[in-house]
């Protein structure tokens, strides 16, 4: 029987690069049982992978949906770690998988990258209050996402709903990984930095001080990027090996949480300030509280909804399904505290 064809999209990015390096540097057996290709934009990046004996597939643009659909039709599994708000490309990946299935009769699967900002409340504007803790075993997650999006459309949430609907229509099994704040240095060949902490750090370099939007006691979650990568590989391994697929929810029930520890926005801002002082980026550990308009201008290009959901909200999840499948994250809250300094050092290095 032919090995399954697997495509990793986003291998030059933070999450995708860490998944790839974890796959290459651990003995999980996955590479022995599949043919792996990397979807890459740009010949110079493709040559880096080619030199390491990795197969690459070049593409022009994620919004070129005809190209994405054509490429996807050649694969049995696609792991998509490109930005989660790209609705059109997500649908094109899945349609392409469905087209391939129609020709070969093979089962096909799609793993999508999202985030828990889909569930976050909006305490600064007061637009939405959400006190409950979500579990990925809950049958009402999909209806909840539909309801939230009917109130306030949000690109990442729209993409998730599109993934579920398109997968069901095309008979493609879909799995959505929904991480909270991701921390730690990536281990890939290109981008090694996450989004939130480096964004605030670069802002601090411009302003001479760390800014804080969320309330001091704002309650949010985190996961280390290497623990997150292990979950992707756990799901991918089950798909490739066909291991007990009935125990692996897909479609409307195929949402996987990954939070491992909790922190407050005060902890986050104070940790960044201390690290930035240590690396010589700023001179004061004092954090400045700011409003949504100033924070959005500094961090999200003026996009207030994106800023509030990602830098000033509250959310609570339990990764019950992920753990039931055997996911065993190893990093602790101490790793979270330590990551600020290593991140600040790399931010400073990349500024020059």
Image (cartoon, rainbow, N blue to C red):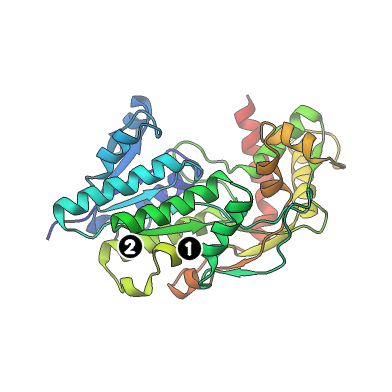
N-term mark: 1 or 2: 2
Task: Say which residue appears at 23% left-offset and 60% top-offset.
Answer: 107
**Residue 231 or 140: which is nearer the viewer?**
140
- Please rate how many residues cluster around mark 2, counting C-alpha atoms within 10 Å: few if below 14, some from 14 to 19, many from 20: some
Q: Which residue is mark 1?
A: 255
Q: Which residue is mark 2?
A: 237
- Helix, strand or loop status at disc 1: strand
Could you say which disc has been placed on residue 109 in the image? none
**Residue 233 or 54: which is nearer the viewer?**
233
Question: Where is residue 200, by image quadrant?
Answer: top right
- Please rate how many residues cluster around mark 1, counting C-alpha atoms within 10 Å: few if below 14, some from 14 to 19, many from 20: many
**Residue 282 or 253: which is nearer the viewer?**
253
Residue 171 in sight from this viewpoint: yes
Question: Where is residue 118, by image quadrant?
Answer: bottom right
Task: Say which residue appears at 76% left-offset and 34% top-offset.
Answer: 204
Residue 53 vs 98, above or below: the answer is above
Nearest to the eye among marks 1 and 2: give it: 1
Residue 11 in sight from this viewpoint: no
Residue 9 vs 129, above or below: the answer is above
Residue 68 in picture, x, y percent from top left: 32, 38
């Amino acid at each position: 029987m032919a090995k399954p064809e697997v495509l990793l999209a986003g291998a030059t990015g933070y999450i995708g690069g860490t998944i790839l390096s974890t796959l290459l540097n651990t003995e999980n057996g996955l590479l022995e049982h599949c043919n792996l290709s990397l979807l890459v934009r740009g010949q110079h990046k493709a040559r880096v992978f080619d030199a390491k004996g990795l197969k690459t597939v070049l593409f022009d643009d994620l919004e070129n949906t005809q190209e994405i659909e054509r490429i996807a039709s050649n694969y049995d599994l696609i792991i998509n770690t490109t930005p989660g708000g790209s609705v059109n490309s997500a649908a094109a990946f899945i349609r392409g998988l469905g087209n391939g299935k129609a020709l070969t009769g093979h089962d096909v699967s799609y793993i999508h990258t999202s985030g828990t900002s889909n569930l976050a409340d909006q305490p600064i504007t007061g637009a939405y209050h959400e006190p409950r803790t979500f579990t990925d075993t809950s049958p009402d997650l999909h209806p909840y996402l539909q309801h939230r999006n009917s109130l306030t459309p949000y690109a990442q949430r729209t993409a998730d709903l599109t993934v579920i609907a398109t997968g069901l229509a095309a008979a493609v099994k879909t799995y959505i990984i929904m991480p909270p704040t991701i921390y730690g240095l990536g281990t890939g060949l290109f981008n090694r930095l996450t989004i939130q902490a480096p964004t605030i750090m670069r802002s601090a370099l411009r302003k001479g001080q760390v800014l804080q939007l969320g309330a001091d006691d704002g309650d949010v979650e985190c996961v280390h990027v290497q623990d997150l990568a292990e979950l992707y590989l756990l799901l991918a391994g089950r798909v490739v090996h066909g291991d007990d697929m009935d125990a692996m929810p897909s479609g409307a029930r195929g949402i996987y949480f990954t939070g491992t520890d909790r922190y407050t926005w005060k902890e986050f801002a104070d940790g960044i300030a201390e690290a930035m002082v240590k690396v010589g980026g700023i001179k004061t550990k004092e954090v400045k509280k700011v409003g949504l308009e100033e924070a959005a201008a500094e961090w999200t290009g003026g996009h207030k909804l994106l800023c509030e959901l990602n830098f000033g909200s509250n959310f609570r999840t339990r990764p019950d399904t992920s753990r039931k499948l055997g996911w065993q994250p190893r990093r602790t809250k101490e790793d979270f505290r330590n990551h600020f300094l290593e991140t600040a050092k790399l931010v400073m290095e990349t500024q020059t």
